[in-house]
Image (cartoon, rainbow, N blue to C red):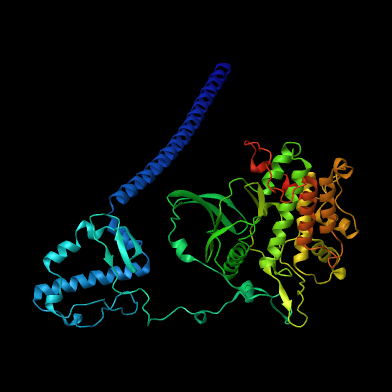
Amino acid sequence: RKAKSNRQTAAKRQRQRHDDAGTSMMQRGQSSIRISGSRSLKFLVVAVVTYAISIQFESAFRTLETPQSHYEVEFAPPGARRWESQREEYKKLIESSEEDGNLSNNLRGDSLSLHDGSEDAPIPDAPTRKQDAPTQKQKQKQNSPSRRLPRSIAVEFVNGILSAMPQNENDQSTDFEEDSMPEDGPKIEPNWYEPNAADFIDVYDDVCEPMYDWQLKSYPNCNKFHELDLQHMRMINTGGSRIAFEMRHQLNGKEAKFVYKTVKYHKEITMKLAEEQRKDSLVMERTSSSEFIPDIHGYCSLGVMMDFMPDGNMHDYIKGARLAGGSTLPPVDRLKLSIHIATSVADLHTIDGTPMPSIFHDDICCHQYLFQDGIFKLNDFNYAGPIYINKETNEQCTRTGFGMSMWKARSFEELQKALKPRDFRPVKPDVIDVWMMGNLIYYMLTDLYTFEKPKNLSWQDSGKELLAGRRSPYPKHIKNSNDPSHIAVKKALDMCWTQDWKERPSARSVSDYLIGQLKEITQEDNPDFRVVLPERDSNQRSTESDYDKYND
């Protein structure tokens, strides 16, 4: 019995080993299956990627082999496609008429119908006799390379006759038989359109009207834009709604640079955006005599061409000064920078030497001043607005709103309306510009932003300080300074930051005061307003600015 028991135990152990071996083989098999499945998935991914790449190469080669005529037909504007269709159909009818020996009835003054659902359009100069059809020699001439390729000509007056002067000296000039606008033809008159600039101004009472006719007009010169090569431009900067490019153009045999500003391409074009461009161009055109506002060189619809100013803006100067631990400009140069600010706003307000302000900027900040030839010049007038006059009293009309977002550097009146609306009263538009230009004069004097020290305040807290009659404090070296330039600038700040807007001096008054003080300090009747700014570190990046931190 013991031997039998031993045999049974040995057999049981042997079966257990067989079972363990089978289980191990099954596990190895499952692992193999998993490995095989993973490899198959990888091979599948590689195959898909390879196929996609081959499709891209095939498409690229097919594009390179596609004839130019394909693009002319496929991607031409609808008008060009319609003209191409007419020309091809006309050509077929001419060929068929030559083969038949007579002309089809379709050519006897009738029009050809396009089969794309558009309106019928007549074929120009359809022949009515067989001899009018082009001869073989004429066909060869029409198909010659000189006929297929565009030719460059210069259109100019020669001896009082408008002529086309080919650039190839071997060709002959051609005189136009008729003017493009015959004397008895229709003339473009103002009644062809109805001005709508007034539709965008809804903040004045019914008793208010434009102070001058030019406030709602525009002065485009679109022909100059049509002569420009807009394909070679370099993007300079972008703003909230617009983008600026550097443009190069040959002028009197020399290359000149300009700035081309237009609406961002992803923006939906609206009448409001068109109106903003009109205002920007209008102000620069009307202030062309000011040396503190850039010159304009062209305007058409959404595009404005102005001076090229590669030396940056006022924010760039402030950023560089703050990163360097403070500006090295002497006090008299800081006085000159204050004159730039005050005089530019004054020239804007009193266009054509008007007795009272007729335009206000509404967005005075350091980003709107560009540096050129030693002077900061005010620009970006797309948010500007005309100042209306009361028909009954002949005084400036007041406003209750200005359509701008609230932040620390806005005017006292806007902060008052946001924090204590019950105390707010309608205000004359130009006085808010005077308050905001005071903010910039403070930047130039102290290298600080308003209410930055001893503790940085939000726009709400800084607004409460202003409403309580307190102002942004001066650093000790400015507060205790006896330098006449420092004293003059601090006096100008008191003028700009007058609490009651009815008592606040005009921008021209502030400008005249500062210029008078500069004459006394320099003992010159015609002092130089230009300033040489400290050289900026070329390694500074735009992301290093702390402007947003201190101007919420």
Along the horizontal axis of the image, is 27 left or right of 353?
Answer: left
Which residue does the image show at 75% across and 66% down from the upper left? 430
Question: If the image is split into quadrants, where does the N terminus sit?
Answer: top right
From this viewpoint, is residue 209 visible?
A: yes
From this viewpoint, is residue 203 visible?
A: no
Closer to the camera, 195 or 540? 195
* Residue 266: x %, y % from top left: 54, 59
* Residue 293: x %, y % from top left: 64, 57
* Residue 542: x %, y % from top left: 64, 43
Residue sitting farthest toward the left: 101
Along the horizontal axis of the image, is 514 left or right of 247?
Answer: right
Q: How many marks?
A: 0
* Residue 178: x %, y % from top left: 31, 74
Closer to the camera, 213 or 60? 213
Which residue does the image show at 32% across and 71% down from the upper left? 82
Which residue does the image show at 52% across and 27% down from the upper left? 20
Which residue does the image show at 63% across and 62% down from the upper left? 287
Along the horizontal axis of the image, is 125 left or right of 316?
Answer: left
Identify whether 199 is placed above or below 220: below
Residue sitting farthest toward the right: 468
